[in-house]
């Protein structure tokens, strides 16, 4: 194993266990570079904190959004406890990583290898932060939108500007100027935060999600004793309701539930056209 590869393995082992460089190097050498075997070796040597930290779930944390010249990035950084998420070192680390995320167009691997102000990589600073705080900390996911669309963002219950537990970015395709769409952009972002759509419309909804929901609905109807002859008919209605509730354009507008989101877009557009190109919604710990 080359020295460069060995260093990468040591870094990876340190990140997942929080154990010091010397112990990790010894474990990597002894296991011939096998990370899983190295973890077991560390446990056998009595470094209990390593295995304990690795097995804990980091489901707290913060969402960070950075914007410049109508380009937006969003990143989720997780910790084990909300207490750590309020720690200044954690917050400041995330804010700087968020700036790098924008510069790297949201590509997480590039973000992890990018340099921070102290000339160390994000990955190395993450390891240092884990060692300092004593909790598992992970950089979970990131996304980016370029400036070819008109973009807006929203952070719900922010603890600082563009830092909070839930973040939204929405991109609109239109000839209208951004300053004419400030109210719509804010309202749409808040709607997405509150209503949690999983897709833009029926066409962009993953077929596996539809099939799974249909299966659940049919089983539910069978178990409720409904006549087999009408189950399919009822299932179609329930499935259409599921699609309407979970696709952004078909959702009831949170400000005026008598209207759908797609109707609101037409109202704002007037003689022009406003289309939602994409939206991103990150909520801390969702799916973990």
Image (spheres, rainbow, N blue to C red):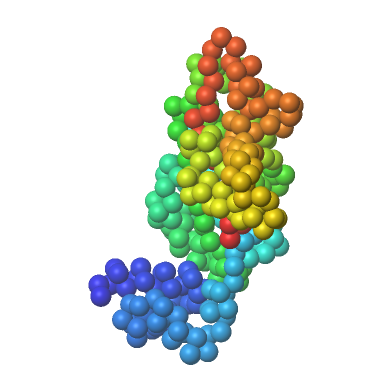
For the C terminus, the quadrant is bottom right
- Depth check: give the residue in front, 253 or 6: 253
Q: Position of residue 269 (x, y in %)?
A: 58, 16
Q: Position of residue 181 (x, y in %)?
A: 61, 21
Q: Position of residue 182 (x, y in %)?
A: 63, 23
- Depth check: give the residue in front, 103 or 189: 189
- Depth check: give the residue in front, 225 or 106: 225
Q: Residue furthest left?
A: 2
User: Could you tell me which residue is drawn at 52 percent across and 56 percent down?
Assistant: 140
Res. 85 visible in picture = no
Q: Quadrant of residue 104?
A: top left
User: Could you tell me which residue is drawn at 56 percent across and 53 percent down?
Assistant: 215
Q: Position of residue 120 (x, y in %)?
A: 44, 58
For the N terminus, the quadrant is bottom left
- Depth check: give the residue in front, 97 or 253: 253
User: Could you tell me which residue is drawn at 56 percent across and 84 percent down?
Assistant: 48
Q: How many marks?
A: 0
Res. 20 visible in picture = yes
User: Could you tell me which residue is drawn at 71 percent across and 47 percent down?
Assistant: 159
Does 103 sit left or right of 164 as displayed?
A: left
Residue 170 against residue 218 in the figure, above or below: above
Q: Quadrant of residue 257?
A: top right
């Amino acid at each position: 194993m080359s020295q460069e590869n060995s260093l990468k393995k040591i870094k990876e082992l340190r990140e997942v266990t929080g154990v010091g460089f010397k112990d990790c190097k010894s474990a990597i050498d002894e296991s011939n570079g096998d990370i899983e075997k190295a973890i077991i070796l560390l446990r056998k040597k009595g470094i209990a904190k390593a295995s304990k930290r690795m097995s804990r779930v980091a489901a707290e944390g913060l969402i960070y959004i950075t914007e410049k010249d109508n380009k937006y990035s969003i990143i989720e950084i997780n910790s084990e406890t909300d207490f750590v998420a309020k720690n200044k070192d954690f917050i400041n680390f995330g804010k700087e990583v968020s700036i790098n995320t924008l510069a790297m167009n949201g590509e997480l691997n590039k973000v992890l290898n990018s340099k921070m102000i102290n000339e160390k990589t994000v990955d190395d600073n993450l390891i240092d932060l884990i060692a300092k705080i004593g909790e598992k900390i992970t950089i979970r996911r990131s996304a980016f939108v370029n400036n070819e669309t008109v973009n807006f963002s929203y952070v719900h219950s922010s603890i600082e500007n563009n830092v909070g537990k839930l973040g939204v970015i929405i991109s609109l395709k239109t000839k209208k100027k951004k300053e004419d769409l400030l109210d719509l952009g804010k309202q749409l972002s808040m709607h997405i935060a509150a209503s949690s759509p999983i897709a833009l419309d029926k066409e962009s909804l993953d077929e596996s999600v539809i099939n799974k929901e249909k299966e659940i609905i049919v089983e539910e109807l069978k178990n409720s004793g409904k006549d087999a002859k009408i189950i399919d008919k009822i299932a179609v209605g329930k499935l259409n309701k599921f699609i309407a509730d979970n696709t952004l354009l078909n959702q009831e507008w949170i400000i005026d539930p008598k209207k759908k989101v797609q109707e609101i877009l037409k109202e704002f557009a007037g003689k022009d056209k406003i289309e939602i190109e994409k939206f991103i919604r990150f909520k801390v710990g969702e799916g973990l």
